[in-house]
Image (tube, rainbow, N blue to C red):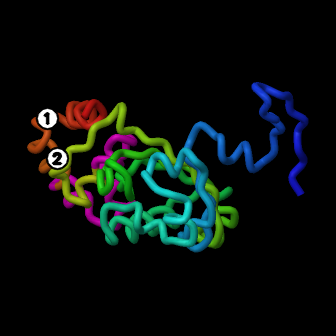
């Protein structure tokens, strides 16, 4: 059972701290999951995705992805990339569910931990940070281009990206060339800089 930390009164409100309060008031989006289903999420996650708690609880993470393919490929990437303690982090494109920005795609930093590294999707704790104020999304990128852009931003080489996405390094180079044309970059560092600056 969670232990309460005695609080003080502020404007007549009891500021007793407990784990539920810490979860709900955290300055970053937090989600608890089982089998890639959302068990619970905090206020920051709800605000980020423009959703009500009832719209997310018990639902698949798939509804927060731009496409089913991206959901499936990200799941496979998580399984392949967990470290020995079950930690994982990346930057990816997510989708707002509802609200004034419904269906808007945005860059998101996701980090977290599978509680059992041997069963990566069995149960996890995930943090979501909305990067849209710092990084704008070019909407004419395909799903695969978004994946490759995210990995380029993280500093991976064509060979590393190919291994992670189970495609050839040459295919990665083709996608990199397309991205460079779309953003008007002459070199990979310029491409990464333009991707970061939006």
Q: Is residue 30 visible?
A: yes
Q: Circle 1 — which element?
A: loop
Q: Does residue 104 lie above or below 78 as drawn? A: above
Residue sitting at 51 percent across and 59 percent down? 81
The answer to whether the residue labelled 2 contacts the one labelled 1, judged by CB atoms less than 8 Å apart, is yes
In magenta segment, residue 172: yes
- Dot 2: within a 10 Å radius of its alpha carbon, few (fewer than 14), some, or many (20 or more) residues? many
Q: Magenta segment: does it hold 30?
A: no
Residue linked to disc 1: 185
The boundaries of the magenta stretch are: 149-174
Q: Quadrant of the N terminus?
A: bottom right
**Front one among 68 and 81:** 68
Q: Earlier in the sequence, mark 2 or mark 1?
A: 2
Separation (CA) of disc 2 from disc 1:
8 Å
Displayed quadrant of residue 162: bottom left
Identify the residue at horizontal 15%, vertical 51% (top origin): 140
| Residue 35 to residue 168: above or below | below
Asked whether the viewer can see residue 160, the reply is no
Q: How many marks?
A: 2
Q: Residue at x 74, y 50 (%)?
A: 20
Extreme front residue here? 12
As displayed, is residue 186 above or below residue 149? above
**Residue 57 placement, left or right of 9:** left
Element carrying mark 2? helix
Task: Name the main secondary structure of what is drawn in magenta.
Answer: helix
Residue position for label 2: 179
Residue at 55% in and 44% down: 44
| Residue, far top | 11
């Amino acid at each position: 059972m969670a232990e309460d930390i005695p609080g003080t009164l502020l404007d007549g409100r009891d500021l007793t701290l407990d784990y539920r309060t810490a979860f709900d008031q955290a300055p970053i989006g937090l989600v608890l999951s089982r089998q890639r289903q959302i068990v619970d999420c905090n206020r920051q996650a709800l605000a980020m995705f423009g959703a009500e708690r009832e719209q997310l609880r018990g639902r698949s993470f798939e509804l927060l992805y731009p496409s089913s393919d991206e959901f499936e490929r990200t799941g496979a990437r998580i399984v392949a990339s967990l470290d020995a303690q079950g930690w994982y982090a990346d930057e990816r494109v997510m989708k707002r569910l509802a609200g004034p920005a419904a269906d808007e795609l945005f860059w998101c930093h996701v980090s977290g931990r599978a509680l059992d590294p041997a069963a990566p999707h069995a149960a996890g704790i995930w943090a979501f940070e909305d990067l849209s104020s710092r990084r704008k999304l070019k909407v004419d990128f395909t799903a695969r281009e978004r994946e490759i852009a995210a990995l380029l931003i993280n500093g991976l080489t064509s060979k590393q990206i190919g291994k992670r996405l189970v495609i050839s390094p040459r295919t990665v180079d083709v996608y990199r060339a397309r991205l460079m044309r779309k953003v008007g970059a002459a070199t990979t560092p310029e491409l990464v800089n333009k991707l970061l600056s939006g």
